Image (cartoon, helix red, strand yellow):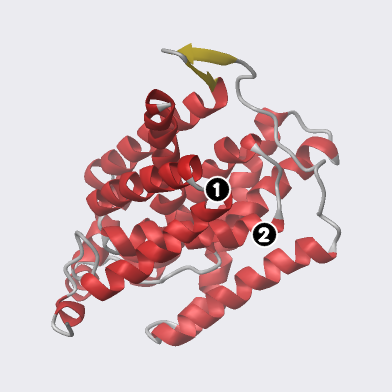
């Protein structure tokens, strides 16, 4: 049992890291807490399904197309909604939460409910790791998580757009004096974060069915990892993913699977009481309040 707990704890941790990376990237660069993130994640799944089954596209066409459309929708959310309330934190939260709610409930009202909404696995097989069976899709998730984390580091250190992202994140006023367009970079960061969430959806959703309620769960898990790790801290995201990921698997093993979401909620409450800025956060305003 210990071996299986360690293997599935590691896989679950990578899944949490994948769903949180996009949310963290957007907040770290633009300062926007995109509460429509879970809805965009689920939208990618439904768009891929529609491309595959309604338009008859091959999956290798439908899936990338869904990622592009999701990123474009996220960019439009910024330009047509968030730009009007930029800097007003409460308004940004309300606006993105409202958009996310509208997207999810739109799919529900259109009848996207049922077990037929599934995506095909990348590799339909299973392997033995020690004495534990692990399906190949979960190994693909681990590989995707490592690749996306490595690409994020490369992108933000060695590409012009990535350096502009870092410039805005570190000091927006100085970046503006150097000719970096803050609104353009912020819109790109929202689209980039949504794109990361979309890629996560394509490898995680084949483990089950695409369901509207999963959008809310994804948002809660992404928030839990980001708040515990520290908003905007990539190292914090990785550490928090493993802490919460293993705690969820231990809870599932020794209690019930339905308690896994409780772990994320308890983690949010605990870190807000003990260290509001998160394990690797550096928001002095929050630290000074305790």
Viewed as shown, does residue 150 lie left or right of 11?
Answer: left
Q: Are marks 2 and 1 in contact (CB under 8 Å)?
A: no
Specify few, some or many for label 2: CA neighbours under 10 Å numbering under 14, 14-19, or 20 or more. some
Viewed as shown, does residue 120 lie left or right of 57?
Answer: left
Query: Whole-percent x and y of residue 63?
Result: 65, 37
Q: Is residue 61 above or below residue 21?
A: above
Report how far apart the C-alphas of labels 2 and 1 lie in the structure: 19 Å
Viewed as shown, does residue 136 lie left or right of 290?
Answer: right
Given residues 190 and 236, the one toward you in this image is 236
The residue identified by callout 2 is: 213
Q: Is residue 166 above or below residue 173?
A: above
**Which secondary structure lies at badge 2?**
helix
Query: Whole-percent x and y of residue 239?
Result: 26, 47
Query: Whole-percent x and y of residue 215?
Result: 61, 58
Q: Is residue 285 above or below residue 35?
A: below
Query: Whole-percent x and y of residue 31?
Result: 34, 71
Viewed as shown, does residue 231 lie left or right of 137?
Answer: left
Residue at the image point whose x is 69% and y is 64% from the top: 104
The residue identified by callout 1 is: 256
Residue at the image point whose x is 47% and y is 80% from the top: 92
Image quadrant where residue 249 sits: top left
Q: Is residue 26 visible?
A: no
Residue at the image point whose x is 44% and y is 86% from the top: 90
């Amino acid at each position: 049992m210990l071996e299986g707990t360690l293997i599935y704890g590691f896989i679950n941790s990578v899944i949490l890291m994948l769903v949180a990376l996009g949310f963290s990237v957007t907040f770290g660069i633009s300062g926007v807490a995109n509460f429509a993130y879970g809805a965009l994640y689920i939208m990618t799944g439904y768009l891929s399904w529609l491309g595959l089954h309604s338009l008859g596209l091959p999956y290798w066409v439908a899936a990338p197309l869904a990622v592009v459309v999701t990123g474009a929708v996220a960019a439009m959310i910024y330009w047509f909604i968030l730009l009007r309330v930029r800097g007003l934190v409460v308004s940004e939260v309300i606006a993105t939460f409202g958009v996310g709610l509208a997207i999810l409930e739109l799919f529900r009202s259109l009848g996207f409910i049922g077990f037929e909404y599934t995506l095909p696995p990348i590799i339909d097989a299973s392997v033995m790791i020690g004495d534990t069976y692990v399906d190949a899709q979960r190994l693909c998730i681990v590989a995707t998580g490592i690749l996306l984390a490595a690409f994020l580091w490369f992108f933000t250190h060695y590409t012009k757009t990535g350096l502009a992202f870092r410039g805005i994140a570190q000091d927006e006023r100085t970046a503006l004096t150097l000719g970096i367009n803050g609104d353009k970079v912020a819109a790109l960061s929202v689209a980039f974060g949504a794109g990361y969430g979309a890629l996560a959806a394509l490898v995680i959703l084949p483990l089950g069915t695409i369901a509207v309620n999963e959008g809310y769960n994804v948002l809660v898990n992404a928030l839990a990892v980001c708040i515990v790790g520290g908003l905007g801290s990539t190292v914090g995201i990785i550490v928090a993913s493993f802490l919460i990921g293993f705690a969820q698997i231990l809870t599932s093993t020794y209690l019930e699977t339905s308690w896994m979401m409780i772990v994320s909620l308890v983690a949010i409450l605990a870190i807000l009481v003990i260290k509001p800025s998160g394990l690797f956060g550096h928001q002095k305003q929050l630290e000074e309040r305790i």
